[in-house]
Amino acid sequence: MSEEAREKTREAGFNLWIAKAKKKHNTRFDYLSSATEFVTQKTSPVTIRCTEHSETFSVLPFNHLRFNSGGCFKCDEQKASDYFLKRERDKFYEFFESNLRERLNIESEFRGMTQEMMFYCKLHKMSSLRKPTFLMNNSGYGCPECAKDAIRSSNRLSMEDVISELQEDLPDNVKILEVEFDEKTQSSKVRINCDIHGQQLTTKGYLRRSQYKCPKCGDESIGYAGHRLKSLIETNNKGRPTYIGAMEVEVFGIKSLKVGVTTRTLQERYKWNLKKIHFSAQLDEIDAYVLENRIHRAFAKNHDLRILMAGMRNGERWSGDTECYWHDKLDDIIAFIKDYIKNSENIAYKSELLLYEVPNFFTRDVSREKDETNIPIAVVGVRPDTLEIVVEFNSISDAYKAGYQNVSTIVSGASERQISHGLRWFKKSNFDEGNVPELKLSRRGNPKTIVCLESGEEFESISIAEQTLRARGIKISGSHISSVCKGKRKVAGGLSWAYKENIHAT
């Protein structure tokens, strides 16, 4: 083929391609440079200019017809962005119509899941900025006042829920009376009645973690049985009909021989932990406590501590873990019980009280004599925000027995720790509400102010946020708050969080 014929063929191919290109893309592209570069649709690329983005790019003529973007990278990005934006918009609006339409109106355009939009709350007659992703994945409030209402509602415990969760673990001496809501602290308190110490207000958290359930019983190492025995002796009273049983129980997947005393039935007291009842008898309450403690003293070397140790490792002990024994002592223990019942007419109860021993299975150093360096130190626990005294103890040891850990470390100043179980701790003799030092900043650097996106509350540090919310009864972890702020986690404590500086930056 001659050169002239080839040129005519090329021009014909170019004109055909141009016609198809303009039909598909209209006036979006300028083909001026491609007229001389065109060879065939599939052999050599041509230079095209995008009039929308003022960008030139090189593409095979065939691909220019095939691609909706024509081969322009900026058009590709724009189309992908438009596609994903439409997809996310449709997803959010579908969620909004199903979940938020009754409470909120949308007052601004959707620009992306992580871009703030303006929402108007029909209930509180106010507008606020919220990110669509937070509404979909976290709270669904869209209004700071609605969020506060929700937090107050979540902090209001119901009597039914408290009974359902805690009733099975209550000792015989403790009964739950009612749940009260403290408007000042926006948290619920549980009123209990202890047969020894009467009515007291405590928290659901304390009832969960305490072995004694009664704060005053927790302060006193002798426990319920010892106090009850003392009370019965002083009033010359035999007490209530009481069961004592030698049973097989299973706790934390561990089976053990349990000797238990209860004024309820054994099945009602030990529920699903009870597997077998090897022997049981009903005695007067005073005899049941004496017998239980005699068994403890007689079989002290045969205690099975596996359940106790497992509970300590798990951070949640089982309430009957100090009266467990090895199975090979079953016959001996049953014989011991029967012998007591046979000869229980002439028990010297006052002498028994003097011999009464609280189970303690850990080595104790009692060699030191008391002096001014190790006398008991009275301590107080106060709320970090209001400095209101919540609890006080005659010694650090008493605080520990009541379930408060790390108090010694805090009051001694031996570490950076300043808060334990949501409270700041001070020696009672040094505490002056009008002259309390501010919480120290972490040595790791200046803490960042964080914001709870639902309620709008600001906290000077993650630590302060954690302790403040825990004091309100909300289970939350500082490390989880940090993960949310860094985008590695969606919520902490059921709430959304962000560094204040990042909110302002957006």
Image (cartoon, rainbow, N blue to C red):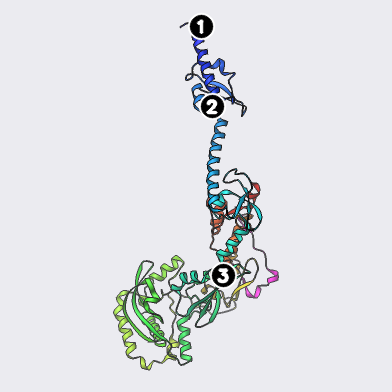
Q: In terms of secondary structure, where does tag 3 sit? A: strand
x, y percentage for residue 381? 60, 71
The kind of residue tagged 1 is: Glu
Q: Is residue 485 above or below residue 242?
A: above
Which quadrant holds residue 421?
A: bottom right
- Looking at marks 1 and 3 on the same chain, the residue that comes earlier in the sequence is marked by 1
Q: Is the residue marked by circle 2 packed among few (<14), some (14-19), or many (20+) residues within 10 Å?
A: many
Residue for badge 2: 70
- Disc number lying in front (3 or 2): 2
Q: Earlier in the sequence, mark 1 or mark 2?
A: 1
Q: Residue 140, position in %: x, y? A: 56, 54
Image height check: is 183 above or below 488?
below
Q: From where the camera sits, is residue 210 visible?
A: yes
The residue positioned 56% from the left and 16% from the top of the image is 35
**Residue range highlighted in magenta:** 420-444
Answer whether residue 442 is magenta in the image: yes
Percent of width and height locating residue 452: 60, 56
Say whether disc 3 or disc 2 marks the residue closer to the N-terminus: 2
Which residue is found at the position 54% from the left and 16% from the top?
A: 37
How far apart are the two marked residues, 1 and 2, measured between alpha carbons?
Answer: 31 Å
- Cα–Cα gap, marks 1 and 3: 95 Å
Tell me the residue at 65%/69% (across/down): 387
Badge 1: residue crowd in 10 Å (few <14, some 14–19, many ≥20) = few
Q: Which residue is mark 1?
A: 4
Give the structural element (helix, strand or loop) at label 2. Answer: loop
Q: Which mark is residue 188?
A: 3
State the SS at label 1. Answer: helix
